[in-house]
Amino acid sequence: MSAPTTQEVHGGVPQERRLVTSIPGPRSTALQARKVNAVSAGVGVTLPVYITKAGGGVLVDVDGNHLIDMGSGIAVTTVGNANPMVVAGVQQQVADFTHTCFMVTPYSGYVEVCEALNRLTPGDHEKRSALFNSGAEAVENAVKIARAYTKRQAVVVVEHGYHGRTNLTMALTAKSMPYKHSFGPFAPEVYRVPTSYPFRDRGLKGPEMAQIAISRIEKEIGAGNVAAIIIEPIQGEGGFIVPGDGYYAAMAQFATDNGIVFVADEIQSGFCRTGDWFASEYEGVVPDLITTAKGIAGGMPLAGVTGRAEMMDAVHGGGLGGTYGGNPVACAAALGALRWMEEVDANGLAKAIEAVMLPRLRSMAERFPAIGDVRGRGAMIAIELVKPGTIDPDADLAAALNKHCHMHGVVTLTTGTYGNVFRFLPPLTMPVPLLEEALTILEAGFESLAT
């Protein structure tokens, strides 16, 4: 199915890149000055343009500039900004009530979202879900569930992984700056083992990297001490690392064989982002628990843990929850977003974006040796930049290209342990001409900066 037109989905946001001032413009600059005086310096901003409206593949700022959105608020507005199905659900729910706390007096929206998650996540086993506010909160609760079920304490994560900014999830996260620097000490009983990073694994295949990781677990931790193994099927902040075929499945099988809860962190890769409902499906992996957030609710704060009923029910009554978890407005947004994904074949839209992006980026890689790798699936695509002829990261070039794109009206994001990866997360409502234009601007950046 082809993507609906932006007029049908998002109302009157013109789907064109239009620059009427420099980037940032004078009004954004004035707001940024106010931000500096009012907001903690610890809250950084990638591109200080202040947005007033968004839809389709466009962000409109306070100066009237129309920018191409290649980030979706870091994979959050997968269904597009102000998606009508999300808006309608939110408006109706706000008019009815905004909060009761599900743990005090519950409501049907929470139950309906959990039913949808149980239905859509991989596997036909009996499942349960619980809702929270953020991805980090979901991951932290997945650890709680795994420990309650197994009566074990150790948690295994992999190199380059990112799982959040709370104390426990900082311990789970690999990268120090900016996520962990100066914030320790961190939670104990967290262990890190090698991942599969094909571009940097010197020819080792996915199953070989899995065996290295498994050997580390067996020798240094003891499989019988491990409550959970937590892995992103495609790593997000680590650099959109797609593991070599067989790695992810081998790690899941090792967990099953040893009574370890296998947790798929699908917070960035879930909800049709990769061309499947969940990226775990690519290798046919059925995780014990799946953590979700970001794309679940069209921009409203919501997260979930979904998993095997016997695991989810192992926690004592009252052990899971939180004042705002599964807020009724956020649940209404999620039900609208999930309905949209099913009705328009969102996976097909993600694959159509891949079909445009990968050939263009691979063509650029042939022209520009600074592109060391092109990878990803669906609308979760990345290029890794290196010093030509090496695999040495080139974070400076990544920063310069990012600035070029920003100044020309394309919102792009860099990522990766080494800061040298461009990640592309366009909303699935992105019109193809805008997508092509964004790639043309990136290519022009390479022509001016990398030749």
Image: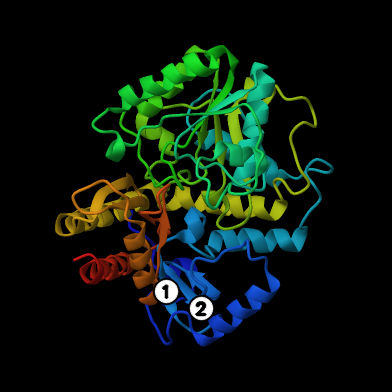
Q: Is residue 258 above or below residue 123?
A: above
- Of residues 205 and 397, the one nearer the viewer is 397
Answer with the quarter of the image where residue 405 lies: bottom left
Distance CA(mark 1)–CA(mark 2): 8 Å
Residue that carries the numbered disc 2 in the rendered image: 61
Type of colouring: rainbow
Q: Residue at x 45, y 40 (%)?
A: 160
Q: Secondary structure at mark 1?
A: strand
Amino acid on which disc 2 is placed: Asp
Query: How many numbered discs?
Result: 2
- Of residues 72 and 162, the one nearer the viewer is 162
Q: Earlier in the sequence, mark 1 or mark 2?
A: 2
Q: Position of residue 166 (x, y in %)?
A: 65, 44
Answer with the quarter of the image where residue 84 lies: bottom right
Answer with the quarter of the image where residue 94 lies: bottom right
Q: Residue at x 43, y 87 (%)?
A: 21
User: Does residue 115 show up?
Assistant: no
Instruction: State yes or no: discs 1 and 2 in contact (Cβ < 8 Å).
Output: yes
Residue 320 falls left or right of residue 366: right
Residue 113 falls left or right of residue 234: right
Residue count near mark 1 (Cα–Cα under 10 Å), binned few <14, some 14–19, many ≥20: many
Residue 139 falls left or right of residue 97: left
Residue at the right extreme of this rendering: 104
- Quadrant in which the C terminus is drawn: bottom left
Residue that carries the numbered disc 1 in the rendered image: 67
Q: Secondary structure at mark 2?
A: strand
